[in-house]
Image (tube, grey):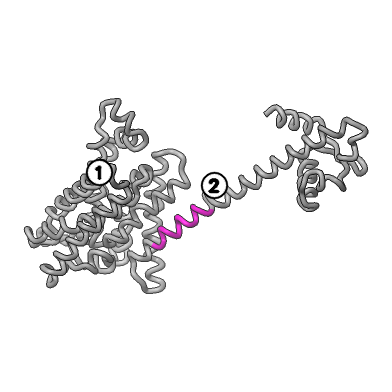
Amino acid sequence: MSAEMEIVLIGVVTAVAASIPGTYLVLRRTAMVSDAISHAILPGIVVAFFVTRDLNSPVLLAAAAATGVLTVVLIEALRGTRLVPEDASIGLVFPALFSIGVILISRYAGDVHLDTDSVLLGELAFAPFDRMVLGGRDLGPRALWTMGTILVLNLTLVSVVWKELKLATVDPSLAALLGFSPGAINYSLMAMVSVTAVGAFDAVGSILVVALMIAPPATAYLLADRFAPMMWTAAASAAASAILGYAAAHAVDVSIAGSMAVASGVLFALAFAFAPRRGLVAQARRRTSQRLDLALRMLVVHLLHHQDTEAELEECRFEGLDRHLGWSETRTRQVVREAEHRDLVARSNELVLATRAGRRLAEEAILR
C-alpha cells in the first residue's frame, strides 16, 4: 500500500471514529464538551508520559480517558452549585487543565516529540513513517492500528448499549425512571470521547479533532430525521471529509489535517444551505409557499365577502384589488395568476370571482 493510500485510510478511520461519539454530543447539545475534553486531557497524557517515557504506551489512552471523565465531573460539579451556568463551567475547567498540560510540556518535555505544536496541530503526512513492527514484520502505520482499534471499541460500545445511550440522550429522566443510570452512561460516553481524542492526537491534533467530531454529525443532523440514519450519515460525511480533504491538500500543498477539517466545514455548509427539509433554501421555499398560501386565502376571503352583493361587486375588480388588499400591483398579478392556476378564481371581464374551490378555501380560512 502506498503512503498516500495509508494517509487517506488513517484520515478516514480517524474521522469515522470521531463522528460516532460526536453524534451523541450534537444530539445532547453539548458539542463544546468535545472541545473541552480534547484540550483538558492534555495533562493526563503528559503525566502518563512522564511515568512511562513512551509516547506509544496504552497507559496514555487510559490516562486521557480518566482525565476526560475528571473534566466532566468537574464541569458537572460546578454546574451543580448553580452559581455558574454550564457554558461558564466548561470555560472555567478546560482552560485550567489545558494550561497545566502546556506548562508541563514547556517546562519538562521540551526535548521530546511531545510538544505543543504536535498536540495542537498534528500532521498526517508523518503518520506512515511510524510503523507497527511485530516479530520483524511491518504491519502498517501505528496510527492506523490505534485509530482502527478505537473505531472498533466505539462501535462495540455503541452496539452493546445502543438503547441505553439513545434513551439517555433523548430523555434522561425516562432513562432514570426505567432503572438506567444516565450519569454512568454519560461518563461512559465521555470516556469514549476522551479515548478517541487522544488517539487522534498524532493524526490531526486536539484542535482539528473537534472539527472531525462535530462537523460530520452536525451535517447529518440536517440531513437525517432518525437516530440510526443520522449516525451512518455522520460516518459517511466524515469519510468524505477525509478523502476530499486529502485531495485538496495534495492539490494545493497545504496541511492535510487542516484540509480535512475545512472539507468537513464545506460539507456542513452545503447541508446547511441545501438540506431537503432543514436547509436554508428549503426553509426559504417553505416561507415563500406559506406567504403565497396566506395571500391566496386573503384573496378568496375578500372576494367571498363582496362578490355576492351587487353594490360591493366593484371591490372585485382586478384594477382595484391592490388597493383593497394593500398589495403592490406586481404582487396582486402574481397572486391572481396563481389563484387562477389552482382554479380558486376565475376572470370575468374586469372582475375576479371566487370559484367553488375558492369559496371552500375561504370558508375554511374563516372557520379557522
Q: Nearer the viewer, residue 141 or 188?
A: 188
Q: Label 2 is placed on what type of residue?
A: Pro
Q: Label 1 is placed on what type of residue?
A: Glu
Taking the view exactly as shown, the residue that stands out farthest to the bottom is: 253
- Chief secondary structure of the magenta span? helix
Q: CA distance from mark 2 to mark 1?
A: 37 Å
Q: Which label lies toward us, 2 or 1?
A: 1
Which percent across, then down, holds residue 68?
21, 50
Is 245 colored magenta in this rendering?
no
Kindly tell me whether residue 17 is visible in this rendering.
Answer: no
Rendered view: 204 above or below 163? below
Is 266 colored magenta in this rendering?
yes
Which percent across, then down, holds residue 66?
16, 48
Determine crowd level at label 1: few under 14, some 14-19, many 20+ residues with C-alpha closer than 10 A.
some
- Which residue is painted at 91% across and 44% down in the image? 350
- Which residue is painted at 49% across and 52% down in the image? 271
The answer to which image quadrant residue 188 occupies is top left
In screen coordinates, is 170 left or right of 142?
Answer: right
- Which residue is painted at 36% across and 52% down in the image? 214
Q: What is the quadrant of the C terminus in the image? A: top right
The answer to which image quadrant residue 215 occupies is bottom left
Q: Nearer the viewer, residue 130 or 241?
A: 241
- Which residue is painted at 69% across and 40% down in the image? 294
Rendered view: 25 above or below 108? above
Taking the view exactly as shown, the residue that stands out farthest to the top is: 178
**Start-end of magenta stretch:** 262-273
Kindly tell me whether residue 269 is visible in this rendering.
Answer: yes
Tag 2 residue: 276
Q: Secondary structure at mark 1?
A: helix
Tag 1 residue: 76
Determine crowd level at label 2: few under 14, some 14-19, many 20+ residues with C-alpha closer than 10 A.
some
Q: What is the quadrant of the N terminus in the image? A: bottom left
